[in-house]
Image (cartoon, grey):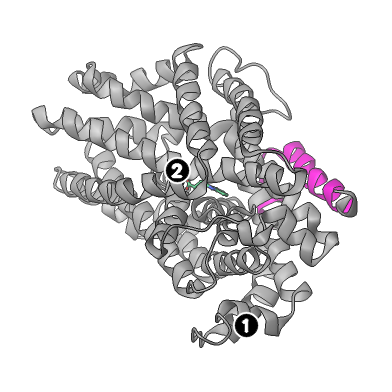
Amino acid sequence: MENKRENWGSRIGFIMAAAGSSVGLGNIWRFPYLAGENGGGAFIAVYLVFIIFIGVSIMLAEFAVGRKTGLAAVGAYKKINKNFTFAGVLGVLSAFFIMGFYPVVGGWASAYILKSFTGLLSNPAAIGDVFGEFIGNPVEPIVWMAIYLVVNIVIVAKGIAGGIEKAGKILMPTLFVLLIAIAVRSVTLPGASAGLDFLFKPDWSSIDGGVLLAALGQAFFSLSLGMGCMITYGSYLSKSENLPSSALTVSLMDTGVALLAGIALFPALFAFGLEPAAGPGLVFVVAPQIFASMGGIGVLFSALFFIALTIAALTSSVSLLEVVVAYLIDERGWARGKSVYTAGGIMVVTGILSSLSLGVMSGVTVFGVGAFDFFDILTDKIFLAIGGLILAVFVGWFMDKNELKEEITNGGKVSFGLFDIWYNLVKFVIPVAIAIVAFFGITGIEQTSLMIFGVGIIVVLGLFSKKL
Ligand code: TRP
């Protein structure tokens, strides 16, 4: 079976696909609003520390596990140690949960392509209200979510190299260039410097357990870590690929785009006198106002920006769908088509629930939160970070150090002088660091019952690991 496994079409193809998975709504939609809600500079500083000391190492570990086993998450864990099968299954569950809300936001981004042309920018004062009314509408955002999901389904149904790779190669550079252009416009607005201060002058007193957990969760979310996504991508990787440099390149690109999104949005946000803690609507409210300030050409910029955002989201969400699909193919023996359509069908239902929870169904809650927040908080605040902790323990304590070195250096062909530092980070530092942040974050958060529920799921999966 293994030698029939598809491979990435080319070296650059893999980097672009992995960067495509990482760079998405997490960078442009979520990072700015989390930074805004959590005090700006201090959050960003902590976030960067987590990326450097935890994110890059975990990404390398995931690549290594995936390529070594040649299997997607569940199979990879199972092959090495059956007690850890549950960590793979937790990853598949995380993929489902993230796909419970991600396509809703992907749908918003797609809708805004059209809205750019239909008068959104002509009344800047109304842009905030337009967003609020749009996401609460019981029909419109659901139609867009469904369109967005169907595109995902088509791409993943076509298979790995063909579908995912092509989309990433073209659109990633476009997005980058656009963000730079928007950032230039943003920092040249009168009053913009307050935004740069907010981003880069940390107020350390704003840091507490909740901020740390938000930064850690965001580091995992943004880099697509902690749920086997990069294990799965790594399993399609050729034996000659340089793993450490791939992990570093992807992490740098991802962090670069997130910071760029911050630099594009916050100066403008302050220039327009808006609230940094505006929440999930931030990019959908601030970016159109920037475009409105550009005059006629703004419409073009707006459409291009939301096209690029939609594609960035797509190259991420296809990786999430792929995690589920790879599991069904590898572990359940399903055909690709059947796997994609079944998983996609379930995601349509969860997407509808999430979207409605922001409007007509806002009164319907589980553990005190609506469907959208349920999926979001469970993955971002618990599953991914704990998934990363389990992976680190697994790699550090249950895999053979020499075999890891073989894998990571391609049997000695790649020199990786930091191997011992990486190994000790993964074995000792990262598990302890995640445990501490998770403990203080989870105990300090408002949604205590939801957190207990989440931890409960992990424990139950763990107890039944050998049966999974
Ligand atoms: N990283 C993507 C983003 O920033 C989202 C994503 C894709 C993801 N695959 C993932 C998040 C796996 C966590 C795990 O938008």
Callout count = 2
Q: Nearer the viewer, residue 41 or 174?
A: 174
Residue 202 visible, this orientation: no
Residue 146 horizontal side relative to residue 330, left or right? left
Magenta extent: 440-463
- Under circle 2, the secondary element is helix
Dot label at residue 458: none
Q: Nearer the viewer, residue 213 or 30?
A: 30
Contact (CB < 8 A) between labels 1 and 2? Answer: no
Question: Which residue is pictured at 21% across the width and 18% down the height?
Answer: 123
Question: Which residue is pictured at 54% across the width and 50% down the height?
Answer: 221
The overriding secondary structure of the stretch rendered in magenta is: helix
Quadrant that contains the N terminus? bottom right
Asked if residue 456 is among those painted magenta in the image, a careful observer would answer: yes
Residue 218 horizontal side relative to residue 94, left or right? left
Amino acid type of the residue tagged 1 in the rendering: Lys
The residue carrying mark 1 is 405
The residue carrying mark 2 is 163
- Under circle 1, the secondary element is helix
Q: Earlier in the sequence, mark 1 or mark 2?
A: 2
Residue 299 in the image, given as x and y percentages of width and height:
18, 28
Q: Nearer the viewer, residue 172 or 268?
A: 172
Question: Which residue is pictured at 40% across the width and 52% down the height?
Answer: 40
Residue 145 horizontal side relative to residue 419, left or right? left
